[in-house]
Amino acid sequence: MKLLVLDVEGTLFRAQVRLPGTTIDSTIWQGIANALGPDAIREEVATHKKWASGGYSSYTEWMKDTITIHKKYGLSKTLFQELIDSAQYNPGVLDALRNVDRSKYELLIVSGGFRELAARAQKDIGIIHAFAACEYLFGEDGKLKAYNLLPCDFEGKMAVIAVMLRECGIRSEDWIFIGDGINDLPVASQAPISIGYCPHPELRKKVTYTINDFSELPQILESLS
């Protein structure tokens, strides 16, 4: 049995937004700022620059600043759900992952994005285990009231993977990672086998395999069985 670890934004789902002045493509995070308007975009871009310059002590602190922007500019439950529902899967994702032999591979989602998007993939693909960095809790008035944060992006993904390897009784050398972005570098650097989906140039240098369509995945997994 091997653990197949999946990133979400940019890997399972298309990363459709990259705001000017940022270096990370996004499905939902930047999509929210884009939907909230020019002032929200300006403040969101400022957080990216702060992160790049080492201005945050952790990924969780970065998320808190971004959430403050979402509250300030009136993110509603309706808009948030529209963005989750409108996210599009990358080519071949559903067929490839639905047909993974579950007697050989345990699937795990680890995302620096939203729990709600990860949950959609869980339902569509049939995945039991998922960790996502942020979950939004809206009040009856449709306004953002609270949130849940987990440090599971960048280096934080490795901590989650270690827990699940132990929980599933899988050896530390028996896992595969699939990601796309520069934020996936820490995981790809430690994964026994890594697969880059249309990867960022820096990630491309680290991964074992590169795919441009998930229809290419079954052949790789079969060769590793």
Image (cartoon, grey):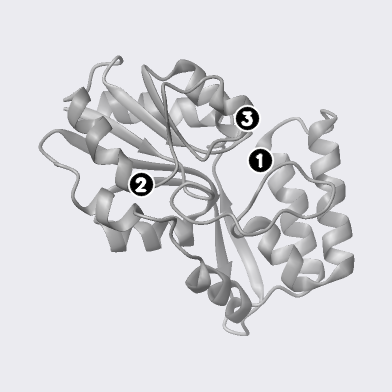
Name of the residue lying farthest toward the bottom: 141
Circle nearer the viewer, 1 or 2: 2
Along the polypeptide, which appears first: circle 1 or circle 2? 1
Disc 1 marks which amino acid? Thr
Residue at (72, 41) in percent of width and height: 61
Label 3 belongs to which residue? 201
Disc 3 marks which amino acid? Pro
| Residue 168, image x, y percentages | 22, 30
Q: Distance of mark 1 from mark 2, alpha carbons?
A: 31 Å
Disc 2 marks which amino acid? Phe
Residue at (82, 28) in percent of width and height: 54
Label 2 belongs to which residue? 214
Circle 2 crowding by C-alpha within 10 Å: few under 14, some 14–19, many from 20: some
| Residue 163, image x, y percentages | 36, 27
Give the secondary structure at mark 2: helix
The quarter of the rendered structure image containing the C terminus is top left
Give the secondary structure at mark 1: helix
110 sits to left or right of 57: left
> Mark 2–mark 3 contact, CB under 8 Å?
no
The quarter of the rendered structure image containing the N terminus is top left
